[in-house]
Amino acid sequence: MREAVRTLQTAGYLRSTQGVGVFVVRREPRAFGMDQSLMGGYTMSDLFEARVAIESTAAALAARRLTDHHRELLESIIASASDPEIDAMSFVALDARLHRQVAEASGNPLLLHMWEGLSAQFEEYSTKVICMPGRQHRAHEDHRSIVEAILAGCADLAAERAREHVFAVQRELRAGATTEN
């Protein structure tokens, strides 16, 4: 019961005051609140922090260690995601595949393992935010710029673009949360 209350508090539905009780503060789900809960009791903020650490390093290493095999995979994913008819869930699957391939292209098996450890939360988060107006297009453009830097062998630029990709959606979520209050 306590875990359920904590999860609902994190999601913004309940407020608990010790000695007084638990109160419903929101009946409708927040559209894009920054700390929506994810499976395992994590928040989107937790996920963003982990993503910045893993993805920026993986992108930099991928730019340094790119093989022809991974070049082809990354180019293929970007080409598939460029389809103007792609539906949101297909895009989410490609999004997850792209980030996994960057981690794999890093050549560091521990970074890949770390990415795989958060992939379920990533896909859950991505499914929640893909419906934000323009999010799919912006994500695709970010992905394209990350992959371009990797393909060009620009490690610092690839890391910066990966960080900025995560920070951009954080800003969008904060702006969405601010406008709904």
Image (cartoon, rainbow, N blue to C red):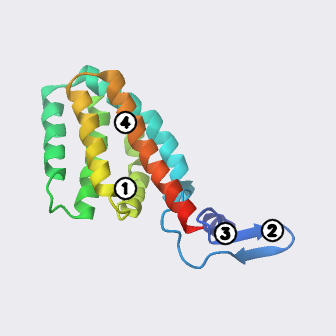
Residue drawn at point x = 35 percent, y = 34 percent: 161
Please tell me which of labels 3 and 4 falls first in the chain.
3
Which quarter of the rendered picture does the C terminus lie within? bottom right
Question: Which residue is under mark 4?
Answer: 162
Task: Give the class, few, some or many, for how many residues have Cα within 10 Å of label 3's Cα (few <14, many ≥20).
Answer: some
Residue type indicated by callout 1: Glu
State how far apart marks 3 and 4 are (Cα): 35 Å
Q: Which residue is mark 1?
A: 123
- Structural distance between the alpha carbons of marks 3 and 2: 12 Å
For the point 38% across and 42% down, the residue is: 165
Amino acid carrying mark 3 in the image: Val
**Which residue is label 2 attached to?**
17
Q: CA distance from mark 4 to mark 2?
A: 40 Å
Q: Is residue 116 left or right of residue 9?
A: left
46 left or right of 63 in image = right
10 or 177: which is nearer to us? 177
Callout 4 secondary element: helix
Q: Find out whether the residues at labels 2 and 1 contact each other: C-beta distance under 8 Å.
A: no
Q: Residue 131 location in percent, x, y?
A: 35, 65
Q: Nearer the viewer, residue 110 or 21?
A: 21
Identified by mark 2, the residue type is: Thr
Query: Is 20 situated above or below 36?
Result: below
Cα–Cα span, label 1 and label 4: 17 Å
Dot 3 corresponds to which residue? 5
Q: Residues within 10 Å of mark 2 (few under 14, many from 20)?
A: few
